[in-house]
Image (spheres, rainbow, N blue to C red):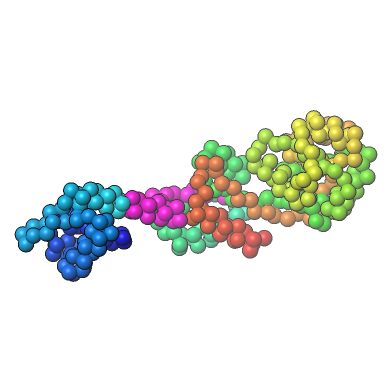
Amino acid sequence: MRFEQLEQFVALGVLRHFRQAAEQTQISTSALTRSIQTLEDEMGYELVKRSTRSVKLTPEGELFLEYAKTTLSELELTKKRIFQSVNGNANEKLVIGYTNKASSIVPISCGQFLAQYPHIKIEMQLQDQQELTRKLQQGEIDISVYSQAINSIGSDIHLPDQLVLFVSKNHPLAHKNDISKQNLDSYPMFGCFSESKQVQTMLNEAIDSLNKSSSIKVGSIEQVMAGVVKSDHFAIASIEHANAIAENSELVQLKTNKGLNHEQLVVQTSQQTSITEHVEHLLSLIKKAGAAFS
């Protein structure tokens, strides 16, 4: 049983005329007759009463007509849902906020996106980073794009400005200027939570990059500072805890080499934004363009 057979049966059930139903479904009358006979064979019941003057549906045919209508309606609804999932709603609008440093990336990426998804509207807003963060948190924009400096601690450790590493003042690394991942490998690590979901994501990524995900001990800033003072651990924290660290005379923040600054593109989505296939495609275009400009 094929969908076109259901369409042909519905046309016959509504028009009650073989020639008219055949014309509507763009097949010959004989082909329509064979299609109905095939349906009757598959169902095991007579669906249509034929006469020279009229076409009548049997009780079984009336039931099958309702089934055919429902099935075709569900088919169209499913097609629509799949199309929207892949291509977005025809009335969909995406709002993208970006800073000056990302102005060479976002318009190009959006142009490439619109070439593939012309029915989706895109609004681009140039904002400073603080306003961008506020709008993203409030759900006023769907995607934010900005560039931030990454300070290098040594040659192969790169952290966003929002993160700091610190140790006890008596730690062997306390006054070392050029620290590599190899230097940190032999020391256990503490980490403390951040109230910001975005900064916490940065913390998790930094911990992964240092290969400490499986061994790190996590706690509050008070617990982490107390643990660092009494051990050879080093610790990672968000900038929100920088003052508490600086005020503790037993702690030292690992020095960052300001001469090794890099720019990193940060792309974030609002929690209210559904990450559909087309949104994923737009995000990938932005990240790809960012990599080309970095």
Which residue occupies 93% across, 45% down?
A: 172
| Residue 281 position within the rendered picture, expressed as x and y whole percent measured from the top left | 53, 57
Residue situated furthest top in the rendering: 222
Residue 42's image quarter? bottom left
| Residue 288 position within the rendered picture, expressed as x and y whole percent measured from the top left | 60, 61
| Membership of 85 in magenta stretch | yes
Which residue occupies 78% across, 50% down?
A: 211
Residue 73 relative to residue 281: left or right: left
| Residue 271 position within the rendered picture, expressed as x and y whole percent measured from the top left | 55, 41
Which residue occupies 28% across, 62% down?
A: 4
Residue situated furthest front in the rendering: 44
Q: Is residue 14 visible in this depiction of the protein?
A: no
Looking at the image, is 141 positioned above or below residue 47? above
Which residue occupies 70% across, 36% down?
A: 194
Quarter of the image with the N terminus is bottom left
Looking at the image, is 127 positioned above or below residue 282? above
Residue 289's image quarter? bottom right
Residue 17 relative to residue 6: left or right: left
| Residue 126 position within the rendered picture, expressed as x and y whole percent measured from the top left | 54, 49
Which residues make up the magenta segment? Answer: 74-99
30 or 228: nearer the eye?
A: 30
